[in-house]
Amino acid sequence: MEKKNLDWANLSFAYMKTDKRFVANFKGGAWDEGVLTDDDRVIITECAGVLQYSQSCFEGLKAYTTEDGHIVCFRPDLNAERMERSCLRLEMPVFPKERFIEAVVQTVYANRAWVPPYGSGATLYIRPYMFASSAVIGVKPADEYQFRILVTPVGPYFKGGVKPITIRVSDFDRAAPHGTGNIKAGLNYAMSLHPIMDAHRQGYAENLYLDPATRTNVEETGGANFIFITKDGKLVTPRSDSILPSITRRSLIHVAQHYLNMTVEERAVPLTEVASFAEVGLCGTAAVISPVGKIVNHGEEICVPSGMDAMGPVLTKLYDTLTGIQMGRIEAPEGWIKNIA
């Protein structure tokens, strides 16, 4: 199939309507067959549960063109499992794992002309999501739901290359103790919008959120997990019940242990320890790794030794190895790569 005539190397990280999207409806206690459709409109009642009580969750993953020309996506099984946990926590019906994976494959294949070519720096972003579609006026779960997948080609998250960012320690809490911080619920991201815009107005790229119970340990940012590199080359990442379990972080841990022979520690990370790390990064689907050069804690500056000019050497090795696996330059662990075309 001929590719779309786009300036692939200069795409922004933004939505662009593509040819097909997947839609399935839950009604009468069961999911229907689902369809691929040209229609990008969502039509629901004004009293839909998603509008009244924010019953919604979503996922994010990418499809790539590998070095040998195949179209693949990365670990969709883990996205299906994470969405299942989100649905159970929000009293929403689970879209079965195998059907989730097959729907991703169908949607990407139907839009394969939109998958950016290898070497362009762009990828096809895949957004599965689910929401309550039937009318709800009392505070209770809806009876009907819609599961959809849209795809859109996106450019690199950071234009002009990856540069270390400056972040601040936030006075806001990202999640409540025993709340919904460990699932990918839309409501979590709605609550993060004011803190991130406030951070931007103050000149910071992101917020560092502390644990909501004691406000002493590092948790995550609004949309990414932390990874720290010690001066003796260990990878340290925060462990907490209120952190969203990042698939990128999980993959980087495996890469560190099995490809780079690094020691990995998953544990509580006190804010007071951050100044001792040699490198600091944020990890997630969009950027893979974003290096942090400076953390500001109410006027006190923590300057990361790797500096503000470039990603540190250990994070660079992790980034190059994981993206090499995703792009087919490095052999992947079994089950990580789903071939589509």
Image: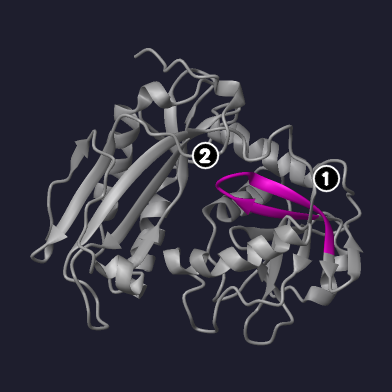
Amino acid type at mark 2: Ala
* Residue 146 inside the magenta-drawn segment: no
Disc 2 on helix, strand or loop? loop
| Residue identifier under label 1 | 312
- Between marks 2 and 1 in the image, the one whose residue lies nearer the viewer: 2
* Residue 289 inside the magenta-drawn segment: yes
How much space separates mark 2 and mark 1, taking CA atoms?
28 Å
Callout 2 environment at 10 Å: few (<14), some (14 to 19), or many (20+)?
Answer: few
Amino acid type at mark 1: Gly
Callout 1 environment at 10 Å: few (<14), some (14 to 19), or many (20+)?
Answer: many
Residue at image x 88%, y 67%?
Answer: 275
Q: Which residues are magenta?
A: 280-295
Describe residue 187's horizontal placement relative to residue 289 as left or right: left
In this rendering, the answer to whether 156 lies above or below 113 is below
* Nearer to us in this view, 201 or 2: 201
**For residue 95, which quarter of the picture?**
bottom left
Residue, far bottom = 214
Q: Indicate the position of residue 288 as horizontal and vertical percent values.
A: 62, 45
Residue 180 shows up from this direction: yes
Residue at image x 28%, y 33%?
Answer: 20
* Nearer to us in this view, 197 or 29: 197
Going from the N terminus, do you reach mark 2 or mark 1 first? 2
Q: Main secondary structure of the magenta part?
A: strand
* Nearer to us in this view, 233 or 120: 120
Q: Indicate the position of residue 66 as horizontal and vertical percent values.
A: 51, 24
**For residue 253, which quarter of the picture?**
bottom right
| Residue identifier under label 2 | 14
In this rendering, the answer to whether 305 lies above or below 271 is above
**For residue 238, which quarter of the picture?**
bottom right
Q: Indicate the position of residue 177 as horizontal and vertical percent values.
A: 55, 84
Residue at image x 62%, y 40%?
Answer: 157
